[in-house]
Image (spheres, rainbow, N blue to C red):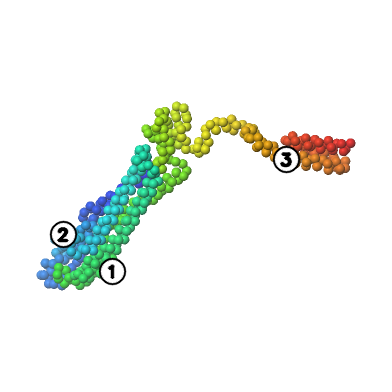
Amino acid sequence: MNTSQKISQAVSAVPVIVAIMVLYMGGSLGTWFIVEEFYQYSATDEDATKLIDYSDYDYYLNEVKVVDYTDSDRQTPLESNLPYSSDGYEQRSTVFYNLGLVLYATMFIALLCSTFLFVLDYLWHEIIKRKLLPGIGKNDILAVIFGGYMAVIVFVLFLALYAVSAIPNAMYEDHYETDKACLYQEDITVIGSVDGCEGRASGERAILQSVWTVGPAFIIFVVGVLGPSVYLLSTVYQRFEEVVERMESEPELFFDSEGRILFDVNTGEVVSSHVDNDKELFYDEDAMTLFDEGTGEILYAASDLYEAVDSKDLVSLAPILSKAPTEAVDEIASGASESDKETVDKDTGSDVEAEDEVVVGAGSVESDSSEEMVEDEAVAVEVVEEETAGSEDVVEAEVVVAETIEEEKD
């Protein structure tokens, strides 16, 4: 396994770890939504000391933690954990329940993808050898992993958009027509504040202020899962392309010396089985060739040469190919059928006759010329003879022309 695959293995565990941390992390790090409220009463100072000055709300996935302070220095907190089934949290209960479902689904898919990567890099040869997944290749597993991380990214984006829109709307719905309705109006956003509005707190009239924002758990989950998933999506796609290219060009073979089978790790197909062969076999990974060490016999070769031409044909053609080109052509042609020979002879004979006619015609014209022209033509004939010395038929035709010219001179 190369360095890139090792990095992918480590990164694939990050989304799972982040999801578990967000689910079981306590304290402020586990909050998804934080609200701080401040109450300025219009009652006398004597009565105000008995009232709540501040309230902090930490929203988790399954409950809300309420911390009330009866002093402006926030030194005397009164903590209480309320389930979302409590009165006044109906809409927020639905929102955080849905967020929890999306989070669990995202964690489960990320865990499956990480497991598939581990199996692909460490156990794939053993699975193919034992035929546990017949007909399923490495490219199929990579396609499933790619689709899984695509689903993780979609789920995380959906969770982020849903939280940004649904949480403010739930705050508005739950506070509608209550003492704090002026703090959470219809136009509330996921991050904001209200400097002051007139309402009621603890049954007393007061000027209310509030500040709210998303919690650390929301940011940790979105960033911690989305970033690694995008990286893994790109690396898995690259690996998928590499596997497809290898499948199109040449197979990636692996020989199991114990099971004595040769299979393609990309497709899971058994390309050669030698279970009944008790001889010493050796597989050359570079040449992708399996042969018998004792006899040197090639049992399987991925090369196109061994697939297209039988080894016996190569042995029979070797002496011929070692000869000169013309000799090799003649010898190969000697094995042709009689009809082929007749066709070749007919074609070559017609060409020779055409050359003879041209030369003889030239001789007849020369015989009618003057004596000076005859001498010039004789020189031309000698030149033609030198140029056509490579063909016996043409040379004989030229000799006849030369005799005709000599008779005309006498």
The one of 58 and 303 positioned closer to us in this rendering:
303
The one of 203 and 40 positioned closer to us in this rendering:
203
State the residue position of label 3: 350
State the residue position of label 1: 187
Quadrant location of residue 384? top right
Quadrant location of residue 352? top right
Residue 70 image position (x, y, % from top left): 14, 64
State the residue position of label 2: 80
Between disc 1 and disc 2, whose residue precedes?
2
User: Marks 3 and 2, how far apart in space?
Assistant: 114 Å
- Whether residue 194 sits left or right of residue 408 in the image: it is left
Could you tell me the amino acid type at mark 3? Ser
The one of 132 and 149 positioned closer to us in this rendering:
132
Tell me the residue at 80%/35% (across/down).
399
Q: Is residue 143 above or below residue 340?
A: below
Label of residue 78 in the image: none
Tell me the residue at 32%/46% (across/down).
115
